[in-house]
Amino acid sequence: MWILISPWFIKWFTPKEVAGITIFPFIILNKKELKQDNVFVNHELIHIYQQLELFFIPFILWYYAEFFFRLLIYRNIQKAYRNLSFEREAYLNETNFDYLKTRKFFSFLKYL
Ligand SMILES: [Zn+2]
């Protein structure tokens, strides 16, 4: 896993509130200070594991399919995003720095 700093990539390829994105095997951040943010990096690392177990492309398809499904339910982009199973798992466990040591495969399914 590599951490890259690329403000232009974040600016052009993600919505405007986004500070970082994980595209296995890279975590791309908009500023280098975020590398020191252990909670933020742990959150993105959880996405690395999710992407690995779904072989990346199925992860992307699932992520967007679930996003549009949740958008239909919540009719709110932020709410739809925060309730994605992948994001729920990452947000609920981002402050637990031992989480990835004990995490079982396909744990995001518990957050569907
Ligand atoms: Zn996330």
Image (spheres, helix red, strand yellow):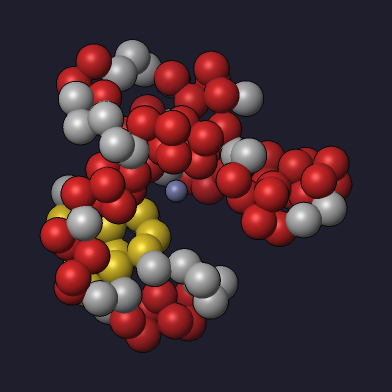
Q: Work out which quarter of the rendered image holds the C terminus and state it.
A: top right
Q: Residue at x 27, y 30 (%)?
A: 96
Q: Residue at x 31, y 75 (%)?
A: 30
Relative to 66, 12 lies left or right = left
Direction front: furthest residue:
95
| Observer able to see residue 2 | yes
Q: Quadrant of residue 105?
A: top left
Relative to 14, 2 lies left or right = left
Q: Position of residue 83 (x, y in %)?
A: 63, 39
Give above or below for 104 relative to 98.
above
Relative to 103, 61 lies left or right = right
Q: Nearer the viewer, residue 49 or 110?
A: 110
Relative to 69, 61 lies left or right = left
Tally of numbered tags: 0
Q: Position of residue 99 (x, y in %)?
A: 26, 24
Q: Position of residue 44 (x, y in %)?
A: 32, 48
Q: Residue at x 44, y 20 (%)?
A: 106
Q: Position of residue 18 (x, y in %)?
A: 47, 67
Q: Nearer the viewer, residue 75 or 56?
A: 75
Give above or below for 42 relative to 12.
above
| Observer able to see residue 55 | no
Give above or below for 20 relative to 86.
below
